Image (cartoon, rainbow, N blue to C red):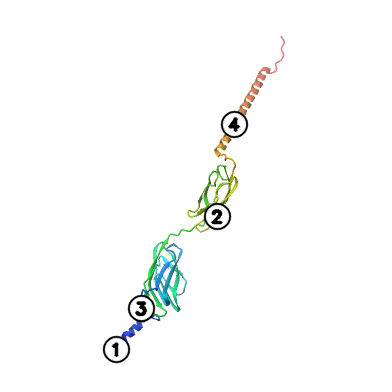
């Protein structure tokens, strides 16, 4: 009799233990084949004050009827700002996801959005996970995992697709002084320049400069486009119109020498003219003085 009473009591206790949250636990397995639940991050790094998506995925080789997941995170590093479902609740470091699947599914994914608050390493940990099989009603206790995340200093991605320096081989200078905000230039090169050779430095180090496909120079006018692509994908095109002369381009040094020679000649001519003028003026002055001396003042006639 006593043994029968004890058996009834044990059965009652087991039945009560099997009923948790309205779900009947008819069996319990750990790490069942083909059934798992994981947490992962969309990106392993996130800038401070930026948002990052975290995915909780439950999957099974058999249809699932019940899913329960408990997660933890550091509320000083991360803030939960959104979820893809009302089934995910919590805050201040704890999140719980509970869903009953009426028709049974083999995979479910829940999306959580966090805002990065402080720079440093942190993680989102799945520490308690259960899946109930739809057909067998077996409740499976699964191993959790953790998704690591590095919060870094936020450096805004630049949209600047301009050039800050531009040099063209064989050209003395651009017709217009280079400016990042001027997007078309005209330049002349000599007959000895057979190819368009240039050097361009972008405003942003990570910008990409794409050269024209054909860089050969024909005699006469040539048209080239230099494309700059910023880290954000913004683009800017600089147009360079190159005129290749049919003769060598006269260097600035030669031009300056000729100009200096002409200027010196002009100065010398001017000095000579001034000297001649001064000489003539002096001669005229001397003549006038001599004339005055010769003529003197009128003298009265005198008779002896």
Q: How many labels does the image show?
A: 4
Q: Which of marks 1 and 2 is nearer the N terminus?
A: 1
Give the alpha-carbon distance from disc 3 to disc 4, as whole Å.
109 Å
Q: Where is residue 177 in the image (x, y as percent from the top left)?
A: 56, 46
Task: Say what secondary structure mark 2 lies in.
Answer: strand
Tell me the residue that label 1 is attached to: 4
Q: Earlier in the sequence, mark 1 or mark 3?
A: 1
Q: Would residue 182 be seen by someone viewing this image from the given angle?
A: no
Report the mark closest to the observer, 2 or 3. Answer: 3
Do the residues under discs 4 and 2 have CB atoms within 8 angstroms?
no
Task: Say what secondary structure mark 1 lies in.
Answer: helix
Tell me the residue that label 3 is attached to: 28
Q: Which of marks 3 and 4 is nearer the N terminus?
A: 3
- Please indicate whether residue 212 sits to the left or right of residue 124 in the image: right
Q: Where is residue 71 in the image (x, y as percent from the top left)?
A: 39, 71
Q: Residue 265 carries which label?
A: 4
Q: Position of residue 181 (x, y in %)?
A: 56, 52
Residue 92 vs residue 294, the one in the foreground: 92
Q: Quadrant of the C terminus?
A: top right
Q: In which quarter of the image is the N terminus?
A: bottom left
Asked which quadrant contains residue 87, the reply is bottom left
Residue 100 vs residue 246, the one in the foreground: 246
Give the alpha-carbon distance from disc 2 to disc 3, as whole Å.
63 Å
Looking at this rendering, what residue extends furthest in the bottom direction?
Answer: 1
Q: Residue 236 carries which label?
A: 2
The residue sitting at 38% across, 69% down in the picture is 145
């Amino acid at each position: 009799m006593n043994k029968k009473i004890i058996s009834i009591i044990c059965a009652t206790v087991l039945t009560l233990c099997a009923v948790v949250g309205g779900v009947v636990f008819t069996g319990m397995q750990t790490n069942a084949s083909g059934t798992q639940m994981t947490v992962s991050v969309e990106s392993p790094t996130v800038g401070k004050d930026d948002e990052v998506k975290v995915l909780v995925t439950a999957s099974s080789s058999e249809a699932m009827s019940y899913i329960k997941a408990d997660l933890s995170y550091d509320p000083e590093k991360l803030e939960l700002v959104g979820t893809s479902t009302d089934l995910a609740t919590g805050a201040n470091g704890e999140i719980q996801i509970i869903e009953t699947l009426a028709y049974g599914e083999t995979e479910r994914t829940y999306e959580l959005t966090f805002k990065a608050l402080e720079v440093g390493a942190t993680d989102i940990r799945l520490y308690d996970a259960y899946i109930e099989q739809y057909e067998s009603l077996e409740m499976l206790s699964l191993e959790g995992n953790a998704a690591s995340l590095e919060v870094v200093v936020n450096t805004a991605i630049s949209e600047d697709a301009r050039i800050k320096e531009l040099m063209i081989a064989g050209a003395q200078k651009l017709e217009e002084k280079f400016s990042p905000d001027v997007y078309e230039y005209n330049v002349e090169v000599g007959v000895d320049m057979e190819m368009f050779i240039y050097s361009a430095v972008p405003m942003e180090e990570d910008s990409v400069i794409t050269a024209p496909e054909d860089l050969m120079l024909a005699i006469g006018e040539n048209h080239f486009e230099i494309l700059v692509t910023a880290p954000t994908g913004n683009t800017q095109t600089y147009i360079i119109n190159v005129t290749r002369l049919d003769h060598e381009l006269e260097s600035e040094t030669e031009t300056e020498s000729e100009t200096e020679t002409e200027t010196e000649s002009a100065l010398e001519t001017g000095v000579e003219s001034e000297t001649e003028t001064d000489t003539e003026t002096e001669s005229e002055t001397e003549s006038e003085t001599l004339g005055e001396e010769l003529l003197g003042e009128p003298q009265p006639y005198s008779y002896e």
